[in-house]
Image (spheres, grey):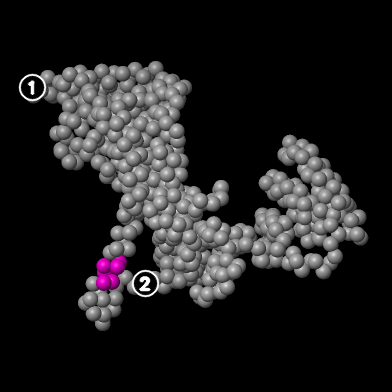
Amino acid sequence: RHARPHRAATMEALAQAITTLPPDAVDRQRLMQCLGNAERNVNVQKNKEASKWVMQVGASLHKLGGEALPLAERVFQHAVFLAKQLDDGAPEYMQCEFDGNNTELGDAFTWLGATESALGKNVEAENHYRAAAKAVEERGCVEFGDKLLHQAIFFRNRKMKRQYDLVITRWENKVLVAGGVGVDGNKEAHDGREGDVALLNATCSLLQEKSMGLAHLGAMTTDTDESDEQTKEAAALRGQTLAAELRAGRLAECAMRLEAHPLRPAGSMPLEAVYDLAASTYDRLKNKRLCIVNISKSLAATAGAKRFAGLAPMGEMKRMVEGDDASVWHAKLVGKWGGPGEGGADSPAELPASASDEEKKAHAKKMEDAELLKTKLPQVMFATLNHVFKVGDVWKMRGGKADMKPVMEHADVVGKSCYALGQQMFAAEAWKECQRPLRAAAALLMHNPYQQGAACHYLACAYFHENNSKFGGSSEKLAQFAAGAFQSAAAARLSLGPKHPKAIKDAIGSLLFLGRVLSEMKDFVNAERVHVQALEIARDALGDKAEETKQCLQSLVGLKHRIKAAAANGASAPPSGVETDRGRS
């Protein structure tokens, strides 16, 4: 009762401070309305609801940043004060009911810690992040994990490894206890076990943060001697490798089990995002093979999640095969921070010399199977990819236009995933293997002519390189396929018109490549026609002084020299024209 005048005065002071903000920087009227709603809730003793309205004000000021941060700090301090109060005039002894079970207080402390961190008040931020976790420690593992996540990020960004390790270990223990499994695997009472959805959600968040911690393993090394730089680099490389393996392994397994659950909540971690993270990590490690494997899995997960062309999510198909056990949480998913695969000592790659031959063979077989498991696609994903690629197999090569509608539902997102996979395979010089995903991308992206042009150009280059590397340039069929793809790439890019100079430049490049292929096919008439067309486009759209115009002139001069040389050698008559492919078996 005595606190009400103090609360009113605080509200009035905050309102006065908000009026000093520039009117174009923040919606002052909305902030005043939020404060008014908070005050009305205080007057009817709904303090926790009032705290939510005050946090909305603070969130807007925090987002504004800069000079508004000190005011945001004051706002969140008041939100903390309100969240601590009891509602409806409850007696003070009821306060014990909210110790460790106060969601509003946890949110207010989290916002306050984030604002203090932005202001450079690290000690205060650390204390308030801890208070946020304490405010919800008796609630479910998902809410508690969310508060520990903020602590973990705070310590990770400041390279405070000891504190970070303690937070992750505490998080692990909370998830295990929530799953009815005590620390170190001791069984506890199952009466309080939380549901599989909550446990899988909490484990996904935990594993994702673990992978981030492993990726920063080198940066969080406490020894800062310059002489130890080599050790730090080795730790960073090992950390990135462990992070990639964790994402592609247990995190993907956990996300798939969550996808398989019929009661999975909206906004849960998408399976395709997990594989994308693993692929990007392997890409940084220059492990092209595993990068391609995880992009392939991401494509399959994307097509399944979108139910593209009658497909189903990978998790649902896993449940169809394995039954309900495919969506059940297991304690082994959590792992152990600081153990094997999570920053601790790894299992030996080789057994000691004293081991028997049978033990060595069994160990070698185990290691071989583990490596094979990393690169092998599950049967359901292999079938899904084949289903997607069939769209390109039956497609007739042609350029798209900007005003076209997508050829089918979710064609854009699946087409872009196909393009990413084909591009990575092309970079790995897998000329034949990259052709199906690139054809599928070109077929699905006809409504996006710029990207479809890029897919057709990569596809044409793949045909060209396969012809040269495998057949020494003697395959007329592959040469015609390459010419048709270059022609479609140029047509798609030119459809965007002269207002897109980058598309014009790329189209000129495709035309010059087309001219080269035609000249190697001894079709000099069409090769010269294509070169002249490219030169005219370059002059009209870019001008005579453009670099592309000069390249067209040089290429045309070189072509004329090759024509004279071919005539002197008595070259045979050129083929009648260029054919386009309609799919390859």
The image quarter in which residue 322 lies: bottom left
Q: Residue at x 17, y 41 (%)?
A: 470
Q: Residue at x 20, y 33 (%)?
A: 478
In the orientation shown, which residue stands out farthest toward the bottom?
354
The vertical placement of 568 against 5, above or below, is above
Q: Is residue 365 magenta?
A: yes
Callout in the foreground (1, 2)? 2
**The N terminus is located in which quarter?**
bottom right
Q: Position of residue 104 (x, y in %)?
A: 72, 57
Q: CA distance from mark 1 to mark 2?
A: 68 Å
Residue 573 shows in the view = yes
Element class at badge 1: loop
The crowding category of the residue bearing disc 2, from other C-alpha atoms within 10 Å (few below 14, some 14 to 19, many at least 20), is few
Q: Is residue 498 magenta?
A: no
Is 76 situated left or right of 91 in this image? left
Element class at badge 2: loop
Q: Position of residue 240 (x, y in %)?
A: 43, 60
Is 403 situated left or right of 550 in this image? right
Three-letter code, disc 1: Gly
Look at the image and give the residue range highlighted in magenta.
Answer: 362-367
Three-letter code, disc 2: Ser
Residue where numbered disc 1 is placed:
570
**The C terminus is located in which quarter?**
top left
Give the numbered dot on residue 347.
2
